[in-house]
Image: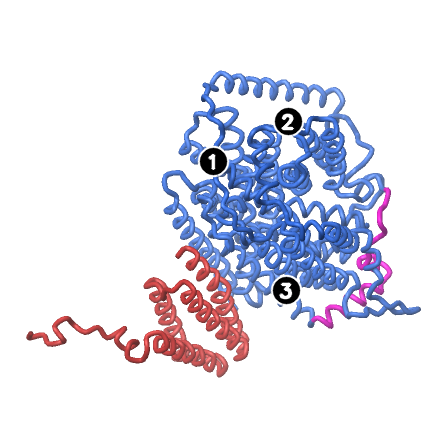
Chain colours: A blue, B red
Amino acid sequence: MTGVAYSVWLPLFTLFYVAVMLYWVRVAARQVSGDDGFFSAGHSLAPWISALVTAGASLSGWFVLGGSRQIAEYGFQMPAVLVAGVTLALPGVVFFKRLWYVAERLRVSSQADIFRVYYKSPFLVVVSTIVAVLFAVGFSGLQLRALSQAVVLLTDGAVTQLTASVIFGFVLFAGAGIGGMRAISYFGVIQTVIAFAAIVVLAGFALIWSGGFGALNAGLLALSNTPDAMALFTVNGVIHFTSGLGRGGDPATASTALANLSMALAFMGFQASPMVLKVVLSTRSPNAFAAGQTWVVAGFCGALIAFAIALIGAAGLVDPGLALEGILIRLQTQSPWFAAWIFIGVAAGVQLLAGLSLFVAGEGLVRHVYKPYFNARLSKHGSVTLTRIAIAVLAVLVMVLQNLAPVTPSALAALALPMAFQLWTPLLGVTWLGWITRPAAITGVGFGIAGVILTEPLGYEVLSFFGLELPWGRWPWTIHSALWGMAANVAAVLIISAITNRKALGPEAIEIRKLLSGVLSTGPDVRTLRSTAWSVVLAWFFLAVGPGLIFGNYAFVQSGEDTTTWLVGMPSLWAWSLGAWVCGVGLVWFLGYKMEMASPSHVAIPPYEPPLRLKQDQSDLERERLRALIITGAAGFVLAVLVAFSFGG
Amino acid sequence: MIERDLLVFAIWAVLGFGGLALLLEGFSRDSYWISLAGIAAIVAGFVAHIVVNGVFDCTFRPGEAALGIGTFGVMALAFIVGWLSGGMSQADYLAGLTLFAVLAFGFLAYLSTRYGLRGAFSHFHHKHADGGDPTS
């Protein structure tokens, strides 16, 4: 095989990928009449397209890039990663159906719209937009950086990281900026299937090069018998009262049961994020949510994570040369066509999420923040054009940050999932818990975000810059920031809901409450199953991702005096997680279908007709807002500089 | 038809490229069985494509037919050039013959099952309006 042969396949497959993407962008652009349908695909996405894109975005490239690395470096200490298919699917079961009906009634198409109409809260709208920006710039930016580095590896430096990131940036803008939501969804189907295929093939190579499943587990068993590596195969207690990872001599990783539980909760933030809800609310029918969440996300994606990604990680654990980068380099030498195909698949998974989050962030900044609060006269055409510009600017920002300031995307990425998880409380207020009041939802999210930021590096580094040294580091007591934030969030919601007027609802909120307690109310069969449902949910969380994981340490292990035997031929926690995944699919099915939380229902929802109101000229108010924003920003900047000079280091 | 086209693209993105990669792997390793797996993937792609056509009650689009026949031609040319240059192993030769035999047989089987033997022939042989008589 010549050097030219090594290098020809990756550009060839990349060209083909870009050509297919541009084809679908063209198809999508031709379907957009005027500017209608750019933001929400005319609410016409087929349910199966929505299910696949949701699954692809949920799995994203993170599980291949980050999940496999987690296992390759830290072993099976975090089984929450292995059952992530289930925890990713659960929010969809809880929210999708009801939010779709809410959006159908109010004729809105995004999470920010729902918050604006239901809670009338600019704060929640801004938080929803910030979460999308965090996913676009941080979460996706970090993955794109990993991809750019992989390109450098695969081309032996012939393509630089900067060039690769420019190409990725262009592809992202072309996909999301030109074609809008339709292009993202159409091409998202293709991206999803090639990402799934790439993961399966990658796992196949990992398995073959490890010598088969038996040899791989023999290697793992030998590793587990070495004193240094024994901890890689167990969950290390329920909780450690440390002052935070990487602080005060504490280790930089956490592997307790509570670390697992809180990480599982962070995963549950993804399907409560504005990106996934954008896809859901652009769908023409809610009748595939149960099937999509049960069989595609929890079933198929769950299997990919529990088997394929675990295999890739385990191969890297036994032989670091078989970690993801090692496999790609070896493939590039021996079978460059497979290396190119797999790389394009992984890139497609990352690009799906990156494109979607760039689009939703751009839309949020223009349509949900700029237009309603600063320029209400902006036309639909103007909104589309401005959104395209915002997407381009964000794509450039992602590219610049990943090349010039790689720590920033990393710090921002750490906030994305836990902050999205904080949106659970306002979403529950809209869909299930009508007693959550407007002040409670807003304050709860505010407290939740504070809890997240203060337990992540960004928060304590920023405070340290201003001279305030927090006594804790990342994830104190080995609890992920998602749970710290949610503890503050729930406490605020409960207290404030108890002391504020629950009847103080706007006309749209009253309409929603009527809708949910009317046509979407559950029948007597479901009500009798409620206690069972609570029991199985709590039991699953306890055993699959909570303190019950301690049982998983020893469930399938027989320890002799000198030797350890794995009763099912694989690490006990891996087997435990596979069992938890199977039970989890059953749980998602039970909640989705039997509890009717996501089941198909054929109810026609007429659009809500708001009471007629006189349109008032908002120009003065908008100018006032802009002035206030500029003054606040300037004052904040000056104050920050003064504090930093006075107390910071 | 958008949904049908999406499915077709998805099928070929997985089975087409997977099959191609396996074929190339088989050729590079001189392994008939790996090549055969690639051929099976390509055949599975065709079968899935035909099933999708059946579900959406349509046939291959002209562009798809042209792309398929063009790809077949390019592969046949590459095979003949490889054979004439003498750079093919026994396994490569067998794999190539199997691929072309399967594709040709599959093509004829598809036409005859979809249009019937007479109809399949008529699909290509268009009678002139003058009944083939240039003098009339």
- Element carrying mark 1: helix
Indicate the position of residue A175 as horizontal and vertical percent values. Answer: 46, 46
Asked if residue B39 lies left or right of residue A504, the reply is left
The subunit letter for the residue under badge 3 reads: A
Indicate the position of residue A526 as horizontal and vertical percent values. Answer: 67, 51
Residue at the image position 82 percent from the left and 54 percent from the top: A548
Q: Are marks 3 and 1 in contact (CB under 8 Å)?
A: no
Q: Earlier in the sequence, mark 2 or mark 1?
A: 1
* One can see residue A324 in this view: no
Q: Quadrant of residue A308?
A: bottom right
Residue beneath disc 2: A504
Mark 2: few, some, or many residues within 10 Å (few <14, many ≥20)? few
Compared with A374, A2 (above or below) is below
Tell me the amino acid under the disc marked 2: Ala
Q: Are marks 3 and 2 in contact (CB under 8 Å)?
A: no
Compared with A202, A97 (above or below) is above
Is residue A221 highlighted in magenta?
Answer: yes
**Residues in magenta?**
A213-241
Q: In the image, which is nearer the foreground, mark 3 or mark 1?
A: 1
The image's mark for residue A387 is: 1
Indicate the position of residue A627 as horizontal and vertical percent values. Answer: 54, 17
State how far apart marks 2 and 1 are (Cα). 35 Å
State how far apart marks 3 and 1 are (Cα). 39 Å
- Element carrying mark 2: loop
Residue beneath disc 3: A203
Q: Nearer the viewer, residue A364 or A116?
A: A116
